[in-house]
Image (spheres, coloured by chain):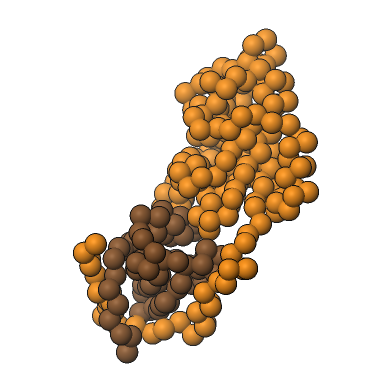
Amino acid sequence: MTPLIQVDERVDARGLSCPLPIVKTAQAIKALGPGQVLEVLATDPGSVKDFAAWSKTTGHELIESSSDGAVYRFVIRKH
Amino acid sequence: MTAIAEAPVREAGLPREPITEPLPEPASEAETKLRDVLIIDYSGDLEKVWATMILASTSAAMGVRTRVFVTFWGLAAFVKDERRITGENWMQKMMAAMQRPGISHRKTSKMNFFGMGPWMMGRLAKQYHVASPKELLEAAQLMGAEFIPCQMTMDMFGLKQEDLIDGMAEPVGAATVIGLMTEGSAPLFI
């Protein structure tokens, strides 16, 4: 079971296509301070690999990547 | 900041499965030194302008310094949408009349059929929640992507800085572009 994480901000990218989930995430993370946590919900199957690549390039830590079969959930801690 | 949600959420009521791919390790200091991206935006065709905007906005979103050198037909997409005729002499004006400038007036390179192709592409994009080139351009600019017009193209087509959208960089020439490549920018010609 995932431990409870305090989420500071949330991006709802459900229904959006590439590259909007990443673009909206990048815009939202700007407003956060280091160590704060962003949750992103998405339905684009390509976003699984895209969020991994985005995290690796930007240095913001992807602390969760999960799916319930309908919605992908990414939890990111700002670098 | 107040917490607006607490993990884990259950959107569809199904058990949430972690994705089997391992999560990437947080990037080390050395890995975060990134190459710049340099897109040479040559084409004014709708689908290529779209590709340029997708890559430029994504590159800027990834924290990569992103420059787009806008040259030849590419520059037509950076003329303000409401400008109908641009240019100083009759040939420049006639060229603008033959193909209306502006990012919202691009034609497809194939299957244009007097505007049916672009219209259908626009409808499909809306249906599948794909952002328009204009929306992506605005997002890219907001995230710091630089759009640099080609001085030679501006002269040849008789375009003035005030014909172009707001926020464009100062016009430069080919030597600046090659200079950036030799300094290690990853180049892309679209």
Q: Residue A28, how many percent across, how many down? A: 37, 56
Query: Which residue in the rendered view is the most extreme toward the top?
Result: B89
Kindly identify the residue that appears in the image at 63 percent across and 42 percent down: B68
Q: Residue A17, how many percent across, how many down? A: 45, 58
Rendering quarter of residue B19 = bottom left
**Residue A49 visible in the shown view:** no
Left or right of B7 on screen, residue B83: right
In the figure, the shade used to draw chain B is orange
Kindly identify the residue that appears in the image at 23 percent across and 67 percent down: B3
Rendering quarter of residue A62 = bottom left
Q: Which chain is brown?
A: A
Rendering quarter of residue B5 = bottom left
Q: Judge by depth and name the residue closer to the eye, B130 or A30.
A: A30
| B40 versus A4 height, above or below | above
The quadrant in which the N terminus of chain B is found is bottom left
The quadrant in which the C terminus of chain B is found is top right
Q: Residue A15, how many percent across, how many down? A: 38, 61
Kindly identify the residue that appears in the image at 33 percent across and 85 percent down: A2
Q: Residue A7, how many percent across, how many down? A: 29, 70
| B138 versus B1 height, above or below | above
Q: Judge by depth and name the residue closer to the eye, B35 or B136.
A: B35
| B63 versus B44 height, above or below | below
Kindly identify the residue that appears in the image at 40 percent across and 70 percent down: A76
